[in-house]
């Protein structure tokens, strides 16, 4: 009784060139199994649609449909028994950072804490360094984390950092998210400067469920940060200045929530965005919204193709 997955088109601005192949990035909050079954209260989603034995294949199918070189996931509570072994056999190297006090642990028969996970194609990239961060807000430690990996692209010879994070959820926590975002930006700056050499810093890709609409302070902080970041979906939008209308759409007892919360940030001086994967239409999502029999999470995946902008001194 599972309908086929809705087809999503790539919106393309440029084709790749052989000596500078694109890097496909996927950002996705996959919905922790324990939260989906035990905490979220998705009242229009049948419990059977959340059955892990089937749902895990929908998540893996989505990943394998797009085969990203870099995969950034949030709410992973099946890393050791599923994603790490399966994706390792498919050529990915990875890192997992659990939340210090994951709400999954409150759910009966949970599978351990949820957290962020970062996967990359181990043939294409060499891992130079990994940092696991516990985010602070106003000097206090919080329950949110980030992974920052420094990678060497074996094809182009370029070094860059990729980060994955999941900021604090819920309304009323806007200032808290902004403080967490500032802490992450500050840490990225430190990690970038440790790589030395490049005056403009190491190119960055920052993926996350920011739990913040584009109007929030944390979005503005990322937009104006000295790291020179831009949002991939904004860059390739029709008017060049719009995020997608939604990246998450769900119905809880408290009501319906349709919101743009997830982003792929990139250094605008170092990468160009060559393509983004369009969001499914409201009709494709359906009246019961997400998750559902044909879509395994309440968040949609974001996929983009980045390529390095040729530096003048490297052009010969
Ligand atoms: P967050 O507020 O960041 O949310 C945690 C998860 O809940 C997120 O994955 C979020 O999903 C989801 N969520 C968001 N809105 C709702 C909602 N309205 N109803 C149900 N789920 C929602 O949590 P923190 O990490 O800051 O942790 C706080 C939680 O941790 C408390 O709720 C408490 O239950 C639990 N806790 C557990 C402890 C323990 O020992 N295990 C100790 C202390 C607290 P999304 O990001 O997709 O919106
Ligand atoms: Ca969630």
Image (cartoon, rainbow, N blue to C red):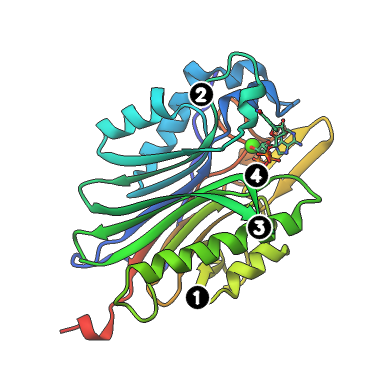
Q: Which residue is mark 4?
A: 248
- What residue is at 23 percent from the left and 85 percent from the top? 313
Q: Determine if the C-beta at disc 4 is less than 8 A from ligand 1.
A: yes
Residue that protrudes farthest toward the left in the picture: 316
Work out how far the residue at label 3 is from the one at label 1, CA to CA, in angstroms. Answer: 25 Å
| Furthest residue toward front | 139
Kindly identify which residue carries mark 2: 55
Residue 228, disc: 1
Mark 3 and ligand 1: say if the CB distance to the nearest ligand atom is below 8 Å: no
Q: In which quadrant will I find the C terminus?
A: bottom left
Measure the alpha-carbon separation of dots 1 and 2: 38 Å
Q: Are marks 3 and 1 in contact (CB under 8 Å)?
A: no
Q: Nearer the viewer, mark 3 or mark 4?
A: 3
Q: Residue furthest right?
A: 254
Tell me: 191 left or right of 258.
left
Q: Position of residue 216 (x, y in %)?
A: 72, 62
Mark 3 or mark 4, earlier in chain:
3
Give whichever of discs 2 and 3 has the lower sequence position: 2
- For disc 3, the marked residue is 139
Secondary element type, mark 2:
helix
């Amino acid at each position: 009784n599972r309908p086929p997955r809705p087809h999503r088109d790539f919106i393309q601005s440029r084709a790749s060139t052989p000596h500078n192949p694109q890097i496909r990035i996927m950002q996705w909050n996959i919905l922790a199994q324990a939260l989906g079954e035990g905490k979220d209260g998705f009242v229009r989603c049948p419990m059977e649609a959340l059955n892990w034995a089937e749902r895990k294949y929908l998540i893996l199918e989505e990943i394998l449909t797009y085969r990203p070189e870099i995969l950034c996931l949030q709410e992973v509570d099946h890393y050791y028994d599923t994603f790490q072994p399966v994706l390792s056999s498919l050529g990915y190297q990875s890192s997992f950072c659990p939340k210090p006090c994951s709400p999954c642990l409150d759910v009966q028969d949970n599978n351990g804490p949820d957290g962020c996970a970062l996967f990359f194609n181990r043939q294409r990239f060499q891992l130079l360094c990994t940092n696991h961060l516990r985010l602070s807000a106003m000097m206090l430690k919080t329950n949110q984390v980030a992974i920052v990996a420094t990678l060497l692209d074996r094809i182009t010879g370029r070094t860059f950092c990729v980060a994955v994070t999941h900021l604090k959820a819920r309304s009323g926590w806007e200032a808290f998210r902004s403080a967490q975002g500032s802490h992450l930006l500050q840490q990225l700056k430190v990690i970038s400067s440790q790589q030395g050499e490049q005056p403009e810093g190491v190119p960055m890709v920052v993926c996350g469920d920011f739990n913040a609409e584009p109007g929030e302070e944390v979005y503005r902080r990322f937009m104006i940060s000295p790291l020179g970041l831009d949002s991939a979906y904004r860059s390739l939008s029709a008017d060049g200045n719009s995020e997608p209308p939604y990246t998450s759409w769900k119905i809880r007892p408290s009501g319906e929530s349709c919101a743009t919360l997830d982003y792929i940030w990139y250094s605008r001086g170092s990468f160009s965005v060559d393509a983004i994967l369009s969001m499914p239409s409201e009709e494709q999502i359906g009246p019961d919204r997400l998750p559902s029999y044909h879509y395994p999470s309440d968040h949609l995946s974001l996929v983009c193709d980045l390529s390095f902008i040729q530096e003048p001194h490297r052009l010969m």
